[in-house]
Amino acid sequence: MSAPWVEIRNLSEHEGREVAIKGWMYNKRSSGKIHFLQLRDGTGFVQAVMARTDVPEETFLEAKGLWLEACIEVTGVVKSDERAPSGYELNVTGLRVFHNPQQEYPIGKKEHGIDFLLDNRHLWLRSQRQRAVMKIRDQVVWAAREYLHGQGFLLADSPILTGSIGEGASGLFEVPYFDEGTAYLAQTGQLYAEAAAAAFGKVYTFGPTFRAEKSKTRRHLTEFWMIEPEVAFYDHEDNMKLQENLISAIVESVLENCQAELGALERDTKPLENARAPFHRITYDEAVKILQDLGSTIEYGTDFGGDDETVLTQQFDKPVFVECYPKKVKAFYMKQHPVRDDLVLCDDLLAPEGYGEIIGGSQREDDYGLLLSRIREEGLPEESYEWYLDLRRYGTFIHSGFGLGIERLVSWVCGLHHIREAIPFPRTIYRLNP
Ligand code: 4AD
Ligand code: MG
């Protein structure tokens, strides 16, 4: 009987037995008597040791001729080995070559520049570091869905092609749309989430969102993924509690399930262990004061720049909420502050260590008249918002929600320098390929 195909992650269940592994050879060391083949199958990494005396001579020669990233099947006996990173090795008994490239793999051991790596993103993803990031991203998304599902949230997906503008008229991608004119790629699923909240109570949308901003910072993508919970009868305060509980649950889940990946990224896990609810809270007014005292030139009434956020978060040992921004720097749908009519009931959640905004949230304006006047003030096309105004005409309700940027969160959790590593195929103003 031929050896069963086994995933590297499950090798421990097969100690002492002969198994087959299918994967790619990402490295090789050889002496005259022995080849050390480093294999990767997507689920893990393992060293396969081929001794000249254990295999037919032509197999040994075939292994000698393997180029990096050859796709192979290796048969061998699983042996525990304390020195191996996975704890196991394979004593090779057989080799099958699916494809031997016969040419040099573009990504070598030498240092490559970031542009070269991004041009080769389709290959760069195979590296151990990129696998660690993507594994953590997977855990982040899984944990978020698990938490929300467990709290009784219903997933209500929102459209990507939309007729109404979510966040502001600048920064829209336009798509010709038959006889209907112009469609926009969704900047947010929020307006639809609000309709769903009136139908289902606790909901969230999760999907790609698009911003045509010409931002060249290490925090901006033109296409990014957002989880947007929206809850009927939650006010500003309830909304922030949900945010800190969700982030705590996600970070805890990553710490529990991704120690190897955090290790591969050399991530100091103390700031993550510290990220337990409740988080710090300051108002916009206080934030401006702190920044000015630290020497920032920020003027009261303007939005924070990336540098301001960096400086601000360095003052705190865990995530910090900044509440109640001036109305004029925020979107039209936010609820007016009950006593300060120049402010809105909103919050940005800033991640520590200089990372900055990972969540933007608010209580929504539920007053028909106030909302309509905000739509007019912003010069938004009123007819596209008729359906949205209906939510205030038929059983208007206190409700709140927020958007969590997946790549922003992954960047912080992984300790990445730039957001482009937090998504498999990043889209920035300069990059549409691969
Ligand atoms: O603060 P934003 O613009 O809020 C909204 O879109 C609301 N409609 C969300 C809601 O209340 N349902 O974006 C929310 C989050 C930001 O905090 C950030 O994490 C992420 O989305 N984000 C970006 N991530 C990467 N690249 C960009 N260009 C981003 N713009 C926003
Ligand atoms: Mg924001």
Image (cartoon, grey):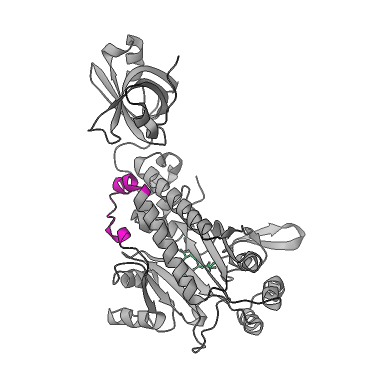
Q: Which residue is drawn at 65% across and 77% down?
A: 396
Side of 209 where 243 appears, left or right: left
Position of the N terminus by quadrant:
top left
Please tell me which residue is depicted at 32% across the width and 59% down the height of the picture. Answer: 272
Q: Which of 270 and 356 is in front in this view?
A: 270
Residue 72 in which image quadrant? top left
What percent of the width, then of the height, locates residue 29? 26, 26
* Depth order, front residue of 139/233: 233
Above-or-below relation of 40 to 419: above
| 289 w.r.t. 175: above or below | below
- The residue depicted at 57 percent of the width and 71 percent of the height is 168
Image position, residue 336 (x, y; %): 54, 83
Left or right, 179 with respect to 398, comes to right
| Vertical order, 19 against 117 (above or below) | above
Rendering coords of residue 266 (x, y %): 28, 49
Q: Is residue 262 left or right of residue 347?
A: left
Q: Is residue 340 visible?
A: yes
Tell me, yes or no, whether the highlighted magenta stretch contains residue 258: yes
- Provide residue 204's location: percent of width, then percent of height: 56, 61
The stretch of residues the image draws in magenta is 257-275
* Above or below: residue 419 compared with residue 389: above
**Can residue 216 be seen in this snapshot?**
no
| Membership of 272 in magenta stretch | yes
